[in-house]
Image: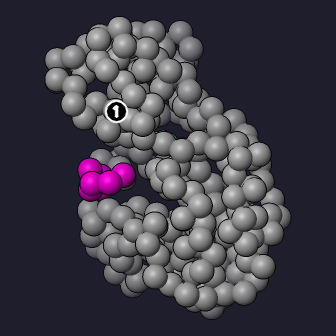
Amino acid sequence: MSTDQWNASLYDNKHSFVSQYGNDLVELLAPNAEERVLDLGCGTGDLTQRIHELNAIVTGVDQSANMIAEAKQKYPMIDFSVEDALHLHYRNEFDAVFSNATLHWIKEPEQVLRGIHQSLKAEGRFVAEFGGYGNVQHITDEIIYQLKRHDVAYREAQFPWYFPSVGEYTPLMEKAGFRVLFAQHFDRPTPLQGEDGLRNWIEMFGKTIFTDVADDVKESIITEVLHHLKGKLYRDGTWIADYKRLRVIGVKE
Ligand code: BEZ
């Protein structure tokens, strides 16, 4: 996201599933003691802390100053700083770059991959998970449909995310200088917390889609979206978001 619109406590309280699911990815990273790891897009630092507990020497970076302030407060023993993934200044410093639920926010994947590659030592690994092709598509299709129904202009450039397929992303990894060891695109239906789970999700993550929309129109759109998606995404009192993940591992050649 270009401006800091992250509310760190809301993120921790209502969307903690983001880091809970990320524990699997830490297992895939399997850091060795004393390895230097960069956690790219660390948010409020929960997974950085998991990596730290495994005795790696981890640095957490995030573009959001709010998130970094919260991370530093929660885990003062860990090195955190505000960094833009598009302008990483590290050179041959890390044994691994780890990134969970971040890279879908950045629409310039080639530039990010170049920065990650430069940050790694020779044979260093890149382990990431983020939204893959078709991620949250029921939700976004419905929001876009309702924007149009409410005569709100919508351009594709407003879509906040980059959700590539394996076929699209792995050639970019190769072009950046990685050998792709692993790539997987899988469904991960994701329960959202509470009766207002989907509303909270849209309010938190879909902000940029509604930037120029008047509050009453936004309210009407969200109400319609919830109404239309109830049959598809609401089960036994819980909203289930239609997440699709892309997981990759690459090694710096
Ligand atoms: C995701 O983790 O896939 C995601 C989170 C927020 C918005 C879009 C996608």
Quarter residue 31 falls in: bottom right
Tell me, yes or no, if residue 184 can be seen here: yes
Q: Which is more toward the observer, 146 or 109? A: 109
Which quadrant of the rendered structure holds the C terminus? Answer: bottom right
Q: Position of residue 100 (x, y in %)?
A: 56, 58
Image vertical order of residue 118 relative to residue 243, above or below: below
Left or right: residue 66 versus residue 121 is: left
Image vertical order of residue 232 relative to residue 18, above or below: above
Q: Position of residue 89 (x, y in %)?
A: 46, 82
Residue at point 81% right, 59% down? 182
Image vertical order of residue 132 relative to residue 127, above or below: above
The residue tagged 1 is 209
Residue at point 41% right, 61% down? 43
Helix, strand or loop for disc 1: helix
Residue at point 63% right, 55% down? 129
Q: Position of residue 115 (x, y in %)?
A: 55, 73
Q: Position of residue 98 (x, y in %)?
A: 60, 69
Badge 1 residue CB within 8 Å of ligand 1: no
Q: Count of labels shown?
A: 1
Magenta residue check for 138 = no
Quarter residue 74 falls in: bottom left
Q: Residues within 10 Å of mark 1 (few under 14, many from 20)?
A: many
> Looking at the picture, which amino acid does disc 1 mark?
Ile
Q: Which is more toward the observer, 119 or 75? A: 119
Magenta residue check for 7 = yes
Tell me, yes or no, if residue 54 can be seen here: no
Residue at point 60% right, 66% down? 113
Left or right: residue 35 versus residue 206 is: right
- Span of residues in magenta: 1-8
